[in-house]
Amino acid sequence: MAISKTLSPANFVHRLPSVSLPEAVNPDHLPCRAPVTAGHRPENTSGPVSGYGRRRYTCSSGTGDRHERRTRCLGGGCSYLCPRIALPVPVRCFEGGTVGVVFAGDNMKVHETRSHTRSSAEEEGKIGKGKQKAENGGRDSEQQQASKTKKAKVEGENRDANGKPAAVVAAEFEEFCKATRQHLSINEMRRILEANEQDPSGSDDAVVPRCQDMMFYGPLEKCPVCYNQVDCSGSNYRCRGAYSEWSTCIYTTTDAWRRDQPVKIPEGIGDETVKEWINKQDSRRYPCRELTSSNKPFGGLMISLSGRLSRTHQTWREEIEKHGGKVSNNIIGANSLVVSPAERERGGSSRVAEAMERNIPVVSENWLIDSIQKQQAQPLDAYGVVSDLIPEGRGIPWDKMDPNEEALKSLTAELKLYGKRGVYKDSMLQEQGGFIFEKDGILYNCAFSLCDQGRGINEYCVLQLIQVPDKNMHLYYKKGRVGDDPKADERVEEWNNVDDALKEFVRLFKEVTGNEFETWEREKKFQKMRLKFYPIDMDDGIDVRHGGLSARQLGVAAAHCKLEPLVANFMKVLCSQEIYRYAMMEMGYDCPDLPMGMVTDLHLKRCEEELLKFREDLKRAPDSGDKANVLWLDFSNKWFTLVHSFRPFIMKNLQELADHVAAGLECIRDINVASRLVGDMSGATVDDPLSDRYGRLGCSVAPLDKESDDHKMILKYLETTYEPIKLGDVTYGASVENIFAVESGAGPSYEEVKKLPNKILLWCGTRSSNLIRLLQKGLLPSVCQIPAPGYMMHLLRPLETDSPQLTGQTGSCSWLWFPWESR
């Protein structure tokens, strides 16, 4: 018997050899009798091995004996090497790109199947049909029609590895879960999990389904990323372990590997029902767990409808149920109440009032529409209809707001904590003259941050001891998300005894961080603990977003300033709040609850060390895959814990690392320098605050004559080298307002620069918020070398001029021209 068609490489990596089968071979014994069981690992392998399956074959020698054999995926299909005939027999590959073999007479025909996985029942239908044709070709058409009808019924059922329909397996598992609750205690379940090398820790609600899943479907393998426990959530398998003290592992899969071994029952668990089930299980294979669909936005939600909506209630009921939710006619037990926006104008119905009393979100119909369109349940807070009518307001977290609304709110929001000596605004104690308690050189004022995107955690925490004149000591504590004050854990406690207040402060510090307060404050030693906060090391000063004044307020000071008018106007820009608020808002670090513009140099150094360490880790890490994804997640959590942002995300490439981390760190560093120079201008006692800040710069700034050669050269240079930027339908260009010549004491003097044998012109674009640091301390190297476009890349040209350093200002953007030695 010869092969009638050769397999192409696209379908099969190893082509079948053109050989003849022995005469003793009965072709009808070759087809597979059992489906591949995805997730069962072959023996003597470690870790998931993609493409392996397990099948049962009838021996091709004609004896009818059955043997368990392994199949290995060869790319586009699978093969089984029969020991009797030494011929690779192609079989179905459960990963797609499959081929099947059907024997008819003396010819072997190769049939290419669909790219997606077929059910085992469907394959058995094909095999049965082929066998029927080979053995009983003479049957009448009525019997053939009956066979086709039977085949169609079989194909419509999903069966497990033991030939049972999925619905039957699910029903058996449900009955098994009921039995285990009756015959096994929680402690016994923990012992069974431990005996089978599964994680016995966690709450009772986590242990029970984990044990039931293991006993019925087989023990799960460990997470291939962090080697912790993997649990079934119903729609997928998710790792519940920790990758590091900063991050929860986010490994998920729909095809978890299970151990092909019986469940072990430890001694002392003598329930007869359990033993009977385990003994029965030894003689069969584990069933394959069928997962539910995970793309239903309303899965597990109970939704109540009220009032006249754009669609009838029956239409919405069908849509909600189609997308995994349920509709309730009662408020009790509902997760949300959907109403028309007109309910607010009419004052609300009785159902709206009841929902408000029960603290159930009342949302508009747009929540349903947007959730269905985006295939993900949207945050309820962003669609609230009557949230501002609830006492104290419900509040919407900033990360749930529309970005445009959030940006406007950020630019106008008052900074609640401006530095180490700042009393948190929401405590209301600053109005009573309260101040931060200090003892033995320690200020009892701490701010913390925690970001773990694997668990959806992004919170800040503030802990203060506040002394109010002629009153007792007050301890203030607050923990929550930015903008979500009504849901925050907040309290103010009054203490008669100072020592008791100090002990409570130290206790709360350890509860929040897992570290000792004295060790942190005196030695700055800190060990990050899992799911615990990390301290933001605030400095003793005032954030420029709080201490600076608005440009309008500084206009009066500029009019009476002794400086040259253009220089006075330049200093007005540098000392105003706006440029720093805009910079922090653009970078996403504008949390009003934490003073990122006033942190210690030690904190900035730790941020830089983490960035440099991660850059080195990337050199040894894989470019893609689960381990690479978790590595990026871990660093993202570290960064957004050290530098709090209410919109954290998982960085994925070097460009995002350059734009949001390296550039963000430099921006925060420069704003901290500006905060120390500007100080508190709100209660300024000097007659000329702008001249005072100009003196602190330590450099001279003078406007450049517009008729000078240098001025004309710069204008021509800008026209030649600057390319307008187009965003959508809007094109942004650049124009020069003023050019200033700067003599800075931070770098080499102009006379020293003139002596350099070879000079080039460094064109350096920067933010206006960075100018104070550049003028006071000079041009510093980038904190990290990252090969990303636009970062650390400057346009260099030979310099043929006798001018000192030049500063050009165009709106909120600035350019610096530095004579630099060419190396």
Image: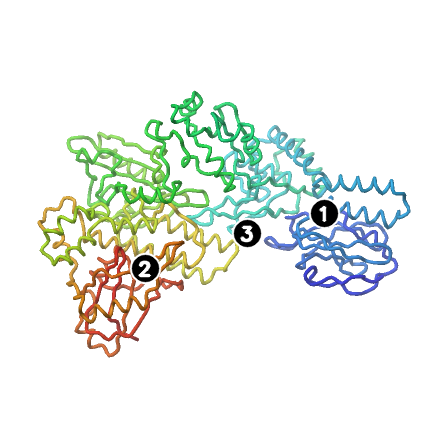
Which mark lies nearer to you, 3 or 2?
A: 2
Asked if the residue at tag 2 contacts the one at tag 3, i.e. Cβ–Cβ closer than 8 Å, the answer is: no
Q: Mark 2 points at which residue?
A: 733
Q: Mark 3 points at which residue?
A: 224
Q: How crowded is mark 1: few (under 14 residues within 10 Å), some or many (20 or more)?
A: many
Secondary structure at badge 3 equals loop
Q: How far apart are marks 3 and 2 (CA)?
A: 51 Å
Q: Residue furthest front?
A: 729
Q: Is residue 355 above or below residue 548?
A: above
**Residue 35 numbered tag:** 1
What residue type is disc 3 on? Pro
Q: Which residue lies furthest to the bottom in this view?
A: 757
Q: How far apart are marks 2 and 1 (CA)?
A: 65 Å
User: What colouring method underlies this structural image?
Assistant: rainbow
What residue type is disc 2 on? Gly
Which mark lies nearer to you, 2 or 1?
A: 2
Secondary structure at badge 1 equals loop
Front-most of residues 542 and 411: 411
Which mark lies nearer to you, 3 or 1?
A: 1
Whichever of labels 2 and 1 marks the residue nearer the N terminus, that label is: 1
Q: Residues within 10 Å of mark 3 (few under 14, many from 20)?
A: some
Q: Is residue 743 visible?
A: no
